[in-house]
Image (cartoon, rainbow, N blue to C red):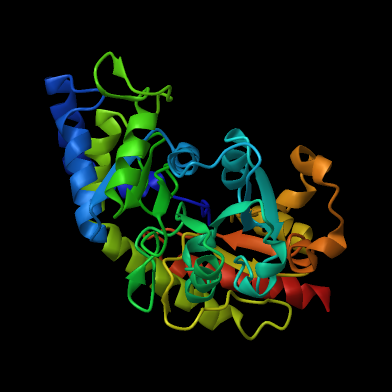
């Protein structure tokens, strides 16, 4: 059996008439940058989130960078984020001239609020919790700490489209939520794309201004900004997909339950934990396992693709060697980075495929005894 890590072709085939029609409309109208298709998607995305503003942009990294700039973050500031996420989060901090400060993760793979306060200094201006793998972070505790120290909070929702904690969706707890529409995301474009959501109108104006060369009116530039825009083709595609995201998220959740039911009795396997009162959308189904690299090779021999999100925690990347962190600084992230393994996960995954993957993992560890 051949099981890809993500199957975007199957998703396209299921939506082909709608997707092709949406693309053709943009081609017919030649509305490639800005225009009605981008405006329609922004309006629909904001409406589905129940927020006042959606500012689309070129990608999820820009969404974080633009948000930090619009919030006034710059040289001399410190911004706290999770030790175990993709570098986009921390490099956006550095791009503003601020310094990234990392916090170890908890058992749910998120920034641990119990370790957050010890990282706050007089230079700390903001916190970026990351809703990794599609599950909300401990937002009540993190927000309480941010509020008590008068810190801004910008949520990295690149993997958590419409996930929720106690019925409240990620991206709506802080000043802003940032999103990626990279093709493999739960809501993915056919290229790069990103967005920011917020209820703060002043912040929304600053963000939109900065993302469009500092200009609201062509050739009238209030500030120097950047060029970060979602194109019309991607907006039209995303508008089609947005109608299906809730069903896709539910399918992923049901697949995750199936995985856990089949894998939880294998002694070597630690299945992902569900945070209480959360709706987990399972962008990633992440196990913790021993002999991971050997397991990866075995699954590959069985036709099963896997991935690691992420093999090196941020503090230990060469890019952050100047911070001089040691494994004891982030004991949980240090341990988890050598154990985590992401299994195939997408709405079109079948029970037969999940059973085959689970049986293959069982066979691997049965052979190790």
Q: Judge by depth and name the residue closer to the eye, 27 or 72.
A: 72
Q: Residue 318: x and y, percent?
A: 79, 39
Q: Is residue 324 visible?
A: yes
Instruction: Give the answer, above or below, for where 284 lies relative to 68.
Output: below
Report the residue at 46% width, 51% height from top: 158
Q: Quadrant of residue 12?
A: top left
Q: Judge by depth and name the residue closer to the eye, 272 or 76.
A: 76
Q: Residue 200: x and y, percent?
A: 31, 52
- Give the farthest residue toward the top: 219
Report the residue at 87% width, 56% height from top: 326
Q: Residue 357: x and y, percent?
A: 57, 66
Q: Judge by depth and name the residue closer to the eye, 356 or 182.
A: 182
Q: Is residue 9 left or right of residue 151?
A: left
Q: Residue 269: x and y, percent?
A: 68, 76
Q: How many marks?
A: 0
Report the residue at 76% width, 44% height from top: 317
Q: Is residue 142 left or right of residue 121?
A: left
Q: Is residue 192 left or right of residue 248?
A: right
Q: Quadrant of residue 350?
A: bottom left
Q: Judge by depth and name the residue closer to the eye, 113 or 220.
A: 220
Q: Quadrant of residue 74?
A: top right
Q: Is residue 20 visible?
A: no
Q: Which image quarter is the C terminus in? A: bottom right
């Amino acid at each position: 059996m051949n099981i890809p890590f993500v199957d975007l072709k199957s998703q396209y085939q299921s939506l082909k008439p709608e997707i092709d029609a949406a693309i053709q409309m943009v081609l017919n109208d030649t509305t490639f940058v800005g225009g009605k298709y981008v405006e329609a998607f922004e309006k629909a995305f904001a409406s589905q989130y129940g927020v006042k503003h959606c500012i689309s942009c070129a990608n999820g990294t820009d969404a974080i960078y633009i948000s930090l700039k619009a919030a006034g973050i710059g040289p001399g500031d410190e911004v706290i984020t999770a030790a175990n996420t993709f570098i986009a989060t921390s490099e956006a901090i550095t791009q503003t001239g601020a310094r990234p400060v990392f916090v170890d993760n908890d058992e749910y793979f998120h920034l641990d609020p119990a370790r957050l306060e010890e990282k706050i200094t007089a230079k700390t201006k903001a916190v970026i919790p990351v809703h990794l793998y599609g599950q909300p972070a401990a937002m009540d505790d993190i927000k309480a700490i941010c509020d008590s120290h008068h810190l801004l909070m910008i949520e990295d929702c690149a993997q958590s489209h419409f996930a929720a904690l106690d019925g409240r969706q990620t991206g709506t707890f802080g000043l802003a939520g940032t999103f990626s529409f990279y093709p493999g995301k739960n809501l993915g474009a056919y290229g790069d794309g990103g967005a920011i959501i917020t209820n703060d109108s002043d912040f929304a104006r600053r963000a939109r201004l900065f993302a469009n060369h500092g200009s609201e009116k062509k050739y009238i530039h209030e500030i120097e900004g950047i060029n970060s825009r979602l194109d019309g083709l991607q907006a039209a595609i995303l508008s089609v997909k947005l109608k299906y995201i809730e069903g896709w998220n539910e399918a992923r959740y049901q697949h995750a339950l199936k995985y856990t039911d089949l894998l939880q009795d294998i002694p070597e396997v630690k299945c992902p934990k569900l945070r209480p009162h959360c709706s987990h959308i399972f962008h990633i189904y992440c196990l913790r396992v021993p002999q991971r690299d050997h397991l990866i090779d075995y699954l590959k021999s069985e036709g099963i693709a896997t991935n690691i999100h992420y093999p090196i925690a941020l503090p230990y990347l060469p890019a952050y060697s100047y911070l001089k962190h040691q494994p004891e600084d982030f004991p949980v992230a240090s341990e988890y980075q050598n154990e985590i393994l992401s299994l195939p996960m997408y709405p079109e995954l079948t029970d037969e495929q999940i059973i085959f993957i689970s049986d293959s993992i069982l066979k691997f560890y049965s052979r190790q005894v």
